[in-house]
Amino acid sequence: MLDVLLIPVTLLLALGLRAVRRGDYRRHSHLMTVAFTLIGLRLLLHPGSLPWPHLRIWLPSLAAAAATMLLGRQALAWREARSIHSSHLRIHRALGTLTLATVAVTIAAWLLRNRW
């Protein structure tokens, strides 16, 4: 039943990517943080339903998402002229793409966990 939390996460990710295409970087950061929080809540609310191999997949995915969010804060600081380091933007973009692909594979593995 807690897998229903993945529906708003998908919607939040889509809205977050749409916001960044429109140039609304602060909204993008808020939407991605909420999506990350919902996935973390799902894992915390019922960790017993997740076998150890799936947990080994989820933890690196969440670590990559957290690193992406930290780099996103620094990229936002550069965009708002509060920092002089523009390299954070490129690294954030690359790590964000990797994180999105990793989370997609992890969610697919999670939803297919009963079929293995």
Image: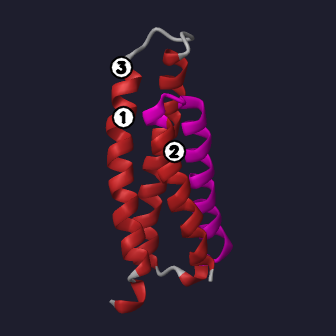
Picture quarter with the N terminus: bottom right
* SS at circle 2: helix
Picture quarter with the C terminus: bottom left
For the stretch drawn in magenta, the main secondary structure is helix
Tell me the mark number nearer the camera, choosing from 3 and 2: 2
Report the residue at 56% width, 83% height from top: 49
Task: Give me the disc on residue 93.
Answer: 1
**Residue designated by label 2:** 16
Q: How many angstroms separate mark 3 from mark 2 (CA)?
A: 22 Å
* SS at circle 3: helix
Examine the structure image and report whether residue 97 is included in the region drawn in magenta: no
Q: Which residues are magenta?
A: 20-47
On the image, which quarter does residue 105 sit in? bottom left
Report the residue at 46% width, 8% height from top: 84
* Circle 3 Cα neighbour tier, 10 Å, few/some/many (<14 / 14–19 / ≥20): few
**Residue 100 % position (x, y):** 38, 52
**Residue 89 % position (x, y):** 39, 25
* Circle 2 Cα neighbour tier, 10 Å, few/some/many (<14 / 14–19 / ≥20): many
Q: Is residue 54 above or below residue 99?
A: below
Tell me the mark number nearer the camera, choosing from 1 and 2: 2
On the question of residue 58 being in view, the answer is yes
Instruction: Say what amino acid the circle numbered 1 marks.
Output: Arg
* Circle 1 Cα neighbour tier, 10 Å, few/some/many (<14 / 14–19 / ≥20): some
Q: How many angstroms separate mark 1 from mark 3 (CA)?
A: 10 Å
Instruction: Say what amino acid the circle numbered 3 marks.
Output: Ser
**Residue designated by label 3:** 87
